[in-house]
Amino acid sequence: MMAERDPENLDPIYISEQQFNKAVCYISVLKEGLIDFLKKPKRITIVNFPIEMDDGSVQSIQGYRVVHNRVFGPGKGGIRYHPDVTMGEVVALAKLMTWKCALVNIPFGGAKGGVVCNTKERSGAELRRITRRFTAELAENIGPYTDIPAPDLYTNEQTMAWIFDTYDMLHPGSNNRPVVTGKPVELGGSYGRTEATGNGVYHATERFLSRALIAEQQTAAGASVVIQGFGNVGAVAAQAFFRNGAKIIAVSDSTGGILNRNGLDPGELMGFKAGHGTVVGMPDTMTITNEEILELECDILIPAALRNVIHAGNASRIRAKVVVEAANGPTTPRADEILADRGIYLLPDIIVNAGGVTVSYFEWVQNQANQRWDIEEVNERLKKRMYEVMDTTFNRWQGFVVGEEIPSDKETGNKSIGQKPDFRCMALSIAIERVAKATLIRGIWP
Ligand code: NAD
């Protein structure tokens, strides 16, 4: 009898360490102590506070804010509200933010926050009290020049408005708008922020295709596209691909998926979802599961919902030419290897969904100058950044794949990874190298 493969370790910290260790093999400037420093979070804040619920009962709420690194500037990263939030998850996501900001070349470090709560069971008034109290508990741990939150899963513009208002009450007399991004436009939010991540997904993919690694698919026009997760990011990405001539053949949300090989119109789908609460049941479509949608034959597969959905168990059945990670962490390290072995390209989250933090940075800049850029300016700047990030990563990847030996870096103490790099590894190595160099240039204090 064949021995079963060990189950994958899906611990978010373990996964981020694996990805980090692989990437540092491609960097020569790292000293061992520096590696340790870059792996660990700078500061973890854990708060517990009581909240009075609408029915008069009192509940104890736990929240986290993690700053991973501030070498390039204030911490930057979303706050998520979810019953399953753990400190480990928040730490791993804060690290990813450090690398993402460094890769996009914006002057922020990485941070992330989480509050353990189920927004579906809380009223608006309860969420407002939770948000205000959490903000007050974080006290000086957030600020326009120290750590700047943004929305994430189950938080939104309204949450950001409450954080801004609470911080502003506690710090009268200053321009406090830059303390959070992703605010409503009425409170200094940027035009184009809501659509930024989805539009960025399209720009990164289009730029990748233009480099002609897939001979028969050098543009998104005419490509068949499958999207798991028809939320903010997935729906906006669907619209961008559709506008540019791609055929969206399947989409899904938490209740299931739909397929029509002749193509779906994202505008009509959004209308249907607004009316029915789901895309399932859309006329002229076949209902499929969230597992089946990932295994459909297509040119471009976009996971835009949850972590770890492409794993050792299904990676061998993926039938896309390129996987585009709109969600954070949808592919496990083992699945990365399986896809690479099968010649399927993967554009990683660190590149693909960086449009969100990029326009968050634009919002922060506009807030400081009390200015408002028009939508065309925001979108043009976003596209330029996404192209730059894709180009920089692609060029480094090409350098290793075409020209150089696979490294075995003595200085870092890492063993040769013995395989060609992928885009995740290349993007991470660029980012880690930038943060490492900046740390040394600043001079280690004292
Ligand atoms: P969202 O809440 O607007 O949408 C999430 C979508 O996923 C919804 O359609 C939901 O129904 C669907 N979903 C939930 N469970 C599912 C399941 N089991 N199977 C399939 N679909 C499921 O969230 P969003 O802002 O679109 O974020 C999506 C992903 O993108 C997340 O991983 C998030 O961390 C990442 N991301 C978002 C941004 C941003 O600016 N919004 C930026 C960077 C990364």
Image: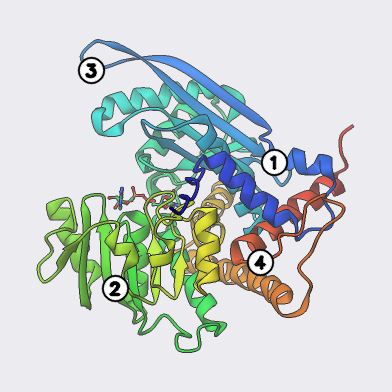
Q: Is residue 176 visible?
A: no
Q: Nearer the viewer, mark 2 or mark 1?
A: 1
Query: How far is the residue under mark 2 from the one under mark 4?
Result: 30 Å
Q: Tag 1's secondary structure?
A: helix
For label 4, count other residues whose C-alpha is less than 10 Å away and answer few (under 14), some (14-19) or many (20+). many
Q: Nearer the viewer, residue 352 or 189?
A: 352
Q: Are marks 2 and 1 in contact (CB under 8 Å)?
A: no
Q: Which residue is mark 1?
A: 39
Q: What amino acid is at disc 4? A: Pro
Circle nearer the viewer, 1 or 3:
1
**What residue did someone put label 4 on?**
421
Q: Position of residue 367 (x, y in %)?
A: 54, 47
What amino acid type is highlighted by mark number 2?
Ile
Q: Is mark 2 within 8 Å of ligand 1?
A: no
Note whether ligand 1 is within 8 Å of mark 1.
no
Q: Position of residue 25 (x, y in %)?
A: 75, 57
Q: How many marks?
A: 4
Asked if marks 2 and 4 touch (Cβ < 8 Å), the reply is no
1 and 3 marks in contact (CB < 8 Å)? no
Q: Is residue 226 above or below residue 370?
A: below
The earlier-in-sequence mark between 1 and 3 is 1
- Other-residue count near label 1 (Cα within 10 Å), few / some / many at <14 / 14–19 / ≥20: some
- The residues bearing labels 2 and 3 have C-alpha atoms spaced at a distance of 43 Å
Image quadrant in which the C terminus is located: top right
Q: Which residue is mark 2?
A: 248
Q: Nearer the viewer, residue 166 or 446?
A: 446
Callout 4: SS: loop
First reached walking from the N terminus: tag 1 or tag 4: 1
Which percent across, then down, holds residue 255? Answer: 21, 50
